[in-house]
Structures are given as structure tokens and as C-alpha cells.
Amino acid sequence: MPKEVIVLRYGHRHVRDYRVTSHCCLVARAFGADKIEIVGEQDTAIERTVSEMNERWGSGARVEFVGSWNERLAHYNKLGFTSVHLTMYGVPIQDAEKGLAGKDKLLVIIGSQKVEREVYEKSDYNVSITLQPHSEIAALAVFMDRIFDGQELSRIFPKAKIAVEPRNKGKKVRKV
Amino acid sequence: MPKEVIVLRYGHRHVRDYRVTSHCCLVARAFGADKIEIVGEQDTAIERTVSEMNERWGSGARVEFVGSWNERLAHYNKLGFTSVHLTMYGVPIQDAEKGLAGKDKLLVIIGSQKVEREVYEKSDYNVSITLQPHSEIAALAVFMDRIFDGQELSRIFPKAKIAVEPRNKGKKVRKV
């Protein structure tokens, strides 16, 4: 199981992609990524959404805006990360997951509509979650669930102010 | 494994929710739902997105706009469906999945920001995918992946015009 997972969101367009990129960030955090990097213009609304979540629901991944995916990929390569680009054109997750779960450090790249050819070429792995077009948010979640073998589902987030008390009917939140 | 899965998208707001609801629909289709019902005003852009996908990538779930979640829940109850509302407040999927995978017919309800208390009460199950706030798109994908035990990942869609040829580098699509 990887000890460190960085999620790199590529192709974010300011304002237009706010909701989809927010979903990506919240999924990365909830499923146990260590950090989220977004390539693009700084968007304080997204940073605020994620940091409010960390404040209330416990300390998880934080967001950083970065200038170039290429520079980040080179940076993480030097640190010994294996890079995995999630795309419907890649190798099926069910074939790749055993190998990837054995890596210590993963850089998971998720794109939006337009992804440059170079991302496919420079990533160590291109991995698909189904061979159909759908959603980078969904792809990220299923990837994380499989790489962490479901252990992320019961993850405890430190320094939480509130936490859910699971139940089959109604909503219950307790102070921590 | 369920023989029939209907996804009911609750709380869709016209225009504002277009992208998130589209992601929900594409995930439902890609992960093998039989039909998607959206509660709300008819939105031809969403219908078009999904039907174009079915046209090119193979015949999967289609979208229908419906008037009331309550009426649909009653309808599917009569047909013997078990209803499952995905929510961070519910019973963890890892505890619920064995029981649910044994059901023949599932109605999977996914909400947006505002979900009425009645949805929690009237659903047979409320199920969480992690106990953290994140994304209904991600929750739906992980739920489907677990209920179908990964078999949806290699699903063949009939009448496809094109299909992906998976590879670790580059993109390859063939005519079917």
C-alpha cells in the first residue's frame, strides 16, 4: 500500500471548473491523498472549501496551486514517485492495481477535457477505470479505493472538530 | 449481484448543476446502471450528452426526467426494488455491501447539496462511502464498483461504433 499519494489536477480552468475541481479535491482528501496540486491560476474559493473541510472534519490533504505539470512531474520523479495518469485510454485498473499498490509513492494525475499528448507519454502508467468516458472524479475515487484496498473508507482524520456517527436512518454528527 | 440498477438523481438544479449531474449520469452509464432518472426540470443538454455517448460508445443507460422522487420511490418499491440512499451519514459501504450485493433490484438515490429528511427516512438503506464530505459522483462510482465486484470494469456495451484499445502510452480507438 502506498505511503504517500499526491494528486495532481491538470487542466483546471478558473471559475468554469470550480465545482468539478472542488469535487476532485474533496475526493482526494476523503480517500486519503496527502496533498493536492492544481495546475492553473490560484483560486481562493477552492482553497477555502478544502481548508474549511480540514478545519471541521479533520486534518487531511491541503491544496496548492502550481505553475506547470511538467515541472511537478520532474520534481516528483526525482523524489522516487511513480506517476499514474488516469484516462479511459489506459491499461485497466484491474490489471494494473497489484503492481501499483506495491509502490511507496504515487503521483496520480487527473485531467479535464483537454489533456496534452505529452501527459500520456511522460507518465509512467496510464490507467483506465472502465473503458468508457465518464468522470475524473469517479476515476480518482475508484483508483484510491482499489489502491488502498478499502482501508481508506474507515480512515480517521486527526484534529477533527466533528465526526459522523453512522446510522441507517437520519443524520447524526458528534463533537470530537 | 443485482440484475437491475436504477440511479435516481435527486435535487438537480437546471443549468447550475449541469456538469455535476452530467458526471453522475456518465458514471451511472459507464458502471452499468440500467436507467437514470433525474428529478427536476427537463434539461435537453444532459439528455443529449448521454444519448450521444450511447450512440458512439455503445448502448447503456438512458436518462429520463421525472417529477417527484417520492412517486418514483413508491413505484420502484412496488416492483420489488430495494432503495439505497448514498450519504456520508449512512452505514459504511464495507458493512452494507454484502447484503446489498445479494439484492436483485436496486434503486440508488444520489442527492446534491440539499436533501430532505424524508429521503433518509423512506430509503431502505442509507449508505456512506467514507464518513467524510466529498462527492455524489465519487460515491456512486465506488458503490457500483463494490456492488458489482469489479465486473462492471470490463463491461461490453452493445451496438458501439467505437471502442478503446487499452494501452500504457498514447490513445487508440478502433471502429467496432
Image: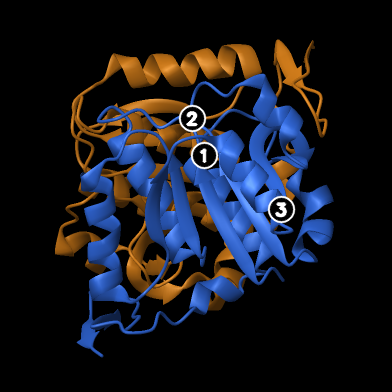
Chain colours: A blue, B orange
Q: Name the residue under label 3.
A: A78
**Residue B25 falls left or right of residue A129:** left
How far apart are the two marked residues, 3 and 1, measured between alpha carbons?
26 Å
Quadrant in the picture for the C terminus of chain A: bottom left
Q: Is disc 1 in the same subunit as disc 2?
A: yes
Q: What residue type is labelled 2?
A: Ser
Q: Name the residue under label 2.
A: A112
First in sequence: mark 3 vs mark 1: 3
Looking at the image, which residue is at 63% across and 52% down? A107
Task: Single out the mark in the foreground, 1 or 2.
Answer: 2
Q: Mark 1 lies on which chain?
A: A
Name the element at disc 3.
helix
Q: What residue type is labelled 1?
A: Glu
Other residues around mark 1 within 10 Å, as few (<14) / some (14–19) / many (≥20): many
How far apart are the two marked residues, 3 and 2, measured between alpha carbons?
26 Å
Asked whether residue B21 is in view, the answer is: yes
Cβ–Cβ below 8 Å for labels 1 and 2? yes
Q: In this view, does B113 lie above or below A2?
A: above
First in sequence: mark 3 vs mark 2: 3
Name the element at disc 1.
helix
Looking at the image, which residue is at 65% across and 34% down? A87
Task: Single out the mark in the foreground, 3 or 2.
Answer: 3
Q: Name the residue under label 1.
A: A136
Q: Is disc 3 in the same subunit as disc 1?
A: yes
